[in-house]
Amino acid sequence: MGTVKQRLEEIDTLRGIAMSSMILIHTNAYFLGDKLSYFLWDYSQFAVPVFIFCSAYLGFKNRGHFKTFKSFFTHLLNRFRRLLIPYYLFAFIYFLLIAIKEPHRITSGFIMKSLLIIGGIDINWMILLFLMFTFFIPVISYTAIRQRWLFYLLIFFSCIFSFIFIFVKFPYNYRFIMWLPWSVVIFFARFFVKVKHSKKWIIFLFMLSTSIFIISGIELKQLSHSLVMYDNKYPPNIYNLTYGISSILALYVLIRKGLFSFAPLKNILHFLSAHSYTIYFLHILIIYTTTILFKFKFNWFSFFLTVFISSLAVQWVLSFTFALCCKGVRQFEYWQARAN
């Protein structure tokens, strides 16, 4: 029982680190003229691979969701509810803020694309990606057991496209193809579930992914292509993906070594993990409010701290309020039942 709890704690810590890094990426994007801010912005781009890895890891660990049509359908409903309800609440508030400060941006096309998650609000590409993977992870689980040829074909195409995007820039909307290279992280997560207890495999995977990262970086440089992670992310190529995989492995080892076991730090990271979806939207609203609506002045560090602490505080208030409401409803139902 303790081992299961430990494994979940490791994933929570990973996802909490990813959420912290995501906030840092979005705040430091306003201070790319500062060398340290730029460095942290560039090398914190492992956040999305970590999010994908954690989601896939839990999906493969809980394969019971995919055994029957009923369990699969229930899984889909829960995932869609968890992804879409916070997003549409966020979109509504975001539209209101834009209407106040930048009304020219509110067009029928912007609203429609935002609602359909095919454009509009920049950050919604990640929601679309996770919706795609809601279907794709069960497909991988099924093909790995029942249709091995299809499973290996999917691996082949995901790897091939991640290499192709080293040399070719996708000319159309990346949102419709991004799932294919990003699925490299999904396949990695599935394999990781099987070998995570083997130190030899962890070392081998780290050396392999780091070697591919270095070699692909050399190739990009020879092609006079940018080595900035952001420039290799939409859609991701093998350079970006192997950096993410190497980061996942390095962080996993550091977590297992107890580097993040200090109780206050671990509690913050686990809180970020437990509420990662809502905090993802909250920090964007806070960034917009502070930079566009009120135009507060910060340096990169004070801006990160402001957004980070504000996001945690607002989420805590929301969680506390929700818990009180639930408690009130239960008490009302209890006394109503006694009265009857």
Image (cartoon, rainbow, N blue to C red):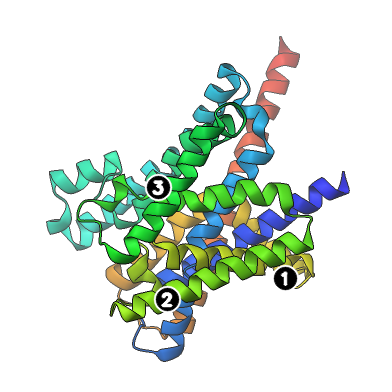
Q: Earlier in the sequence, mark 2 or mark 3?
A: 3
Residue assigned mark 1: 254
- What residue do we see at 48% from left, 83% from top? 301
Tell me how far mark 1 sits from mark 2, CA to CA.
Answer: 25 Å
Q: Amino acid at mark 2?
A: Gly
Instruction: Report x, y in % for residue 121.
Output: 28, 53
Q: Earlier in the sequence, mark 1 or mark 3?
A: 3
Q: Is residue 132 above or below residue 103?
A: above
For the residues bearing labels 1 and 3, Cβ distance under 8 angstroms: no
Instruction: Give the mark count.
Output: 3
The answer to which image quadrant residue 1 occupies is top right
Tell me how far mark 2 sits from mark 3, CA to CA.
Answer: 21 Å
User: Which numbered circle lies on residue 180?
Assistant: 3
Residue assigned mark 2: 217
Q: Is residue 111 left or right of residue 232?
A: left
Instruction: Report x, y in % for residue 73.
Output: 52, 22
Query: For mark 2, does the 10 Å Cα neighbourhood hold few (<14), some (14 to 19), or many (20 or more) residues?
Result: many
User: Which numbered circle lies on residue 199?
Assistant: none
SS class, disc 3: helix
Q: Amino acid at mark 1?
A: Leu
Tell me how far mark 1 sits from mark 3, CA to CA.
Answer: 29 Å
Query: For mark 3, does the 10 Å Cα neighbourhood hold few (<14), some (14 to 19), or many (20 or more) residues?
Result: some
Quadrant of the rendering where the C terminus is positioned: top right
Q: Earlier in the sequence, mark 1 or mark 2?
A: 2
The answer to which image quadrant residue 15 occupies is bottom right
